[in-house]
Image (spheres, grey):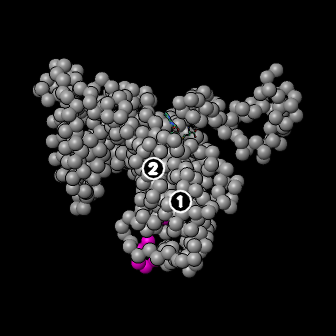
Amino acid sequence: MSEETLCQVCAKSARQKCAGCHLVFYCTKEHQKSDWKTHKKACKPYKVCQDDTLGRYLEATRDIKPNEIVLKEAPLIWGPAENTVPVCLGCGNTVDENCKPCFKCGWPFCSETCQKSPAHIPECRYTVMRGDKVAVKNFGIVHPIYQCITVLRCLYQKQFLPEVWEKIDKLESHCEHRKNHPKYENDRVTIAQFILRFFKLGTVFTEEEILRIVGILTVNGHEVPLSEPCYEAIYQTCSMFEHNCRPNCRKSFTDDGQILITSGQKISKGDHLTICYTDPLWGTSNRRHHLYQTKYFWCNCSRCKDVTEGGTNFSTMKCQNECNGYILPKTFLDNEDGDKLQDWECNKCKKIMNSYSVHEILERLGKDLSLIEKGSSKSCKEYISHAEDFLHSNHYYLTDAKINLSQLLGHEEKTLLPNLSEDDILLKAKLCRSLTNMIKKLVPGEHRLTGLLLFELHAAIAEIGRRGSPESLPEALMESKNILMEAMGLLKFEPESLPEGKIYKQAQKNLIDIERVLKTVQTTFGDKLL
Ligand SMILES: C[S@@+](CC[C@H](N)C(=O)[O-])C[C@H]1O[C@@H](n2cnc3c(N)ncnc32)[C@H](O)[C@@H]1O
């Protein structure tokens, strides 16, 4: 009999599997109940595995349904991002001239409550020990002194809190790889040497120890959008998730700073659990280079291997030979600058466009995109109409501009939803629908953007319904309600402090309104209209 089939409590033969992890067994319900207090901490639907390419990764130990909470975890360490304007070291938000410096060490805070934050103890203690207070004077611009804070917080664990340090120490740092990177030398001077000199810690830590921590933060750090600007944090188990450009899990954060990983689709027992380390709405070449620069590996996931990205043509351009064909390279997987040297071939006329010409067009369109007048639907429309001459309609640049336009229509000053022209309300609905369908195909687990697009779509559909004949209203309202409920399902884990969480709250109110109107319509017209 295998070990798995012995009762966790009494080691007798057992058939009852724990439904949470599928890893432990019990002989009776009573034994399962009595063990729950102990087993609860270890009961997870995954286990840590290892291989030569990925290092450690997570594998599902049972089938996981879509939208299940897979992991919720508090940070091991958090602190300001590497390049940041002066921020409050208690909450991460920007501080200015009106800040309240800590009376012990001088670091600026937004409030006295934040000054008392336990997170501040490390830099406070090291600053007091150096014998001189800090005086931050330049606000609103990137301040190099903040580069040291999160590293210093890790060093403090190493010196004083070995049980936390042990967990940090086990994380990947890619030190050997980073040594060949120009940033390593820069980090040595601006972070390691600075910490050793400024805090007079030369007899306590070495440059190598500090640079290893910089590596751990780079490889495992998450940008947490709960403050303005975002802060950075590392989470122990979450660091084991592997990357995929079409991940099966998604991450969000709770209002109190925990990371929350939920399943974005059905996951089968034995599947690897993956999240996306980069922006899934970037083109393949940009995603791969970003991952290589920041996480030190070349992604070879199924999305990166397929130039059409699941048939979405997210990186495809139009042939300029007026044949209505599309051009793509044979692969995006050539590393270093290889993908910049690839020829692109038309699927219709077979004409070749060299990579130099392709990248010239892309660079120009990328620059034009960055110059779109913020908040102007007119400027978005002009960009889209121009870029459509060169790019597939799903191309990432066009997708970016269309997302922008879909959100702007109905939200511009003087042109709120009820005042939108007939053409614009139909355009908004069309954009939201096509973008949602494309993103579901490209990154099925994506939830935040899809949720926002569906929220906008429900509003557009209800408005179109209101403008139509009374007979068509109930059908439009029903469709709007179903779309709203889908949006709510996607946004339900978003924290209230973020825009997505606020939209979720708004969606709850809108659902009540739609149901009330539907009831009225039902009473007026009778059931036959529904
Ligand atoms: C946050 S860590 C993940 C845990 C890590 N594997 C470990 O053993 O500590 C990120 C590192 O894992 C590896 N990794 C993650 N996803 C990968 C992927 N799709 N392909 C290759 N390596 C990957 C890379 O070395 C990357 O720098």
Mark toward the viewer: 1 or 2: 2
Category of crowding for the residue at label 2, using alpha-carbon neighbours closer than 10 angstroms: few (below 14), some (14–19), many (at least 20): some
Residue 8 in picture, x, y percent from top left: 82, 34
Which percent across, then down, holds residue 293?
A: 41, 43
N-term-proximal mark, 1 vs 2 = 1
- The answer to whether 385 appears left or right of 106 in the picture is left
**Label 2 SS:** helix
Q: Residue at x 68, y 37 (%)?
A: 20
Q: Is residue 267 visible?
A: no
Q: Secondary structure at mark 1?
A: helix
Q: Residue at x 42, y 50 (%)?
A: 183
Mark 2 — residue?
A: 184
Q: Is residue 372 visible?
A: yes
Q: Which is nearer the eye, 122 or 363?
A: 122
Q: Is 94 inside the magenta-drawn segment?
A: yes
Which label belongs to residue 342? none
Q: Is residue 160 left or right of residue 2?
A: left
Q: Residue furthest front?
A: 203
Residue range in magenta is: 92-99
Q: As shown in the figure, which amino acid type bears the numbered disc 1?
A: Thr
Residue 325 vertical placement versus 73 (above, below)? above
- Quadrant hosting residue 35: top right
Q: Is residue 126 magenta?
A: no
Left or right, 458 with respect to 391, comes to right
Q: Which residue matches tag 1?
A: 150
Asked whether the beta carbons under mark 1 and mark 2 sit within 8 Å of each other, the answer is no
Mark 1 to mark 2 CA distance (whole Å): 17 Å
Q: Amino acid at mark 2?
A: Tyr
